[in-house]
Image (tube, rainbow, N blue to C red):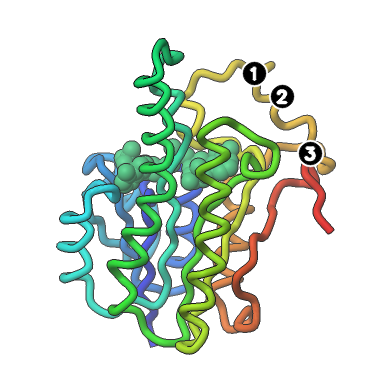
Amino acid sequence: MTRTVVVTGGGTGIGQAIAARFAGNGARVIITGRRQSVLEHAAGEITGNVEVARFDATDADAVTAFAAGVGPVDVLVNNAGGNTDFDRTAPNSLGEVADSWRANYESNVITAVLMTTGLLSHMNDGGAVVTIGSIAADKGSGSYGAAKAAIASWNIDLARQLGARSITANVVAPGYIADTEFFRDVLTHEAKDGLASPAMTGRAGAPRDIAEMVEFLASDRARQITAQTIAVNGGEWPTR
Ligand SMILES: NC(=O)c1ccc[n+]([C@@H]2O[C@H](COP(=O)([O-])OP(=O)(O)OC[C@H]3O[C@@H](n4cnc5c(N)ncnc54)[C@H](OP(=O)(O)O)[C@@H]3O)[C@@H](O)[C@H]2O)c1
């Protein structure tokens, strides 16, 4: 039976690779994001059954409207997010500090929580929720790393809640991934090499590295894996 997969932030980078991976395996994929032209361009590049839905995943009303019309969902990939500090100047007041912390929490935590809560009653039993975390949760990266750490904690409770429905909930935590809009296209070649060099594999991660793991976690081969944070970072940050 054709599975329905929702990928937030599916118009660029890691999300687009995840969408392409599921669509290539025959799923009906819905990619979401805030820019219509970006979503349509991505849909045109992906081979398979891809639909687009433009809305801001921090907007509760927009998420409610999307959930009401989407139909049954098998896999939700909470990929939307990023470090909103890249769009801000350094804070000059406590108010600006609060704004920057709220922005990263909204972008990375609220998006995932609203999408998951909004779609839960539409999800088929036996499905999967996969949320994209970050190596920044372990290494530290201000409000961005703190927001990604919050996701990992929230995911444990989510997995507990969904276990009875045989829906798994996991976080995939990438290291540095090249070919995304994450760094807003401002990195020099030297800066990219500097980000890639701590990986034991000697290379930057690619969006497809994350897509492979997400697709596996949502597959029949991973039904006993839940409540976990899975690192995909080329060994940059080892775990036991
Ligand atoms: N690249 C890395 O090195 C790296 C490392 C660790 C973790 N990550 C995580 O990987 C995920 C994907 O990022 P990426 O690297 O692929 O960067 P990206 O190309 O910037 O992708 C982020 C996507 O999220 C969408 N998005 C952001 N805020 C949104 C919102 N409020 N509502 C709906 N869509 C929203 C963006 O589209 P619109 O702007 O059009 O909405 C964009 O398509 C993020 O959660 C990021 O934190 C990335």
Amino acid at the residue labelled 3: Ala
- Badge 3 density bin: few <14, some 14–19, many ≥20, Cα 10 Å: some
Report x, y in % for residue 96: 37, 20
Residue on which disc 2 sits = 193
Image: 71 above or below 164? above
Residue 189 disc label: 1
Residue 12 seen in the figure = no
Q: Residue at the location (81% across, 37% down)?
A: 202
Residue on which disc 3 sits = 199
Quarter of the image with the C terminus in it: bottom right
Residue 186 seen in the figure = yes
The answer to whether residue 120 is left or right of residue 224 is left
Residue 85 disc label: none
Report x, y in % for residue 179: 54, 36
Amino acid at the residue labelled 2: Asp
- Badge 2 density bin: few <14, some 14–19, many ≥20, Cα 10 Å: some
Q: Residue at the location (60% across, 57% down)?
A: 172
Report x, y in % for residue 25: 48, 72
Report x, y in % for residue 203: 75, 37
The answer to whether residue 74 is left or right of residue 50 is right
Quarter of the image with the N terminus in it: bottom left
Q: Residue at the location (36% across, 50% down)?
A: 110
**Residue 81 position by quadrant:** top left
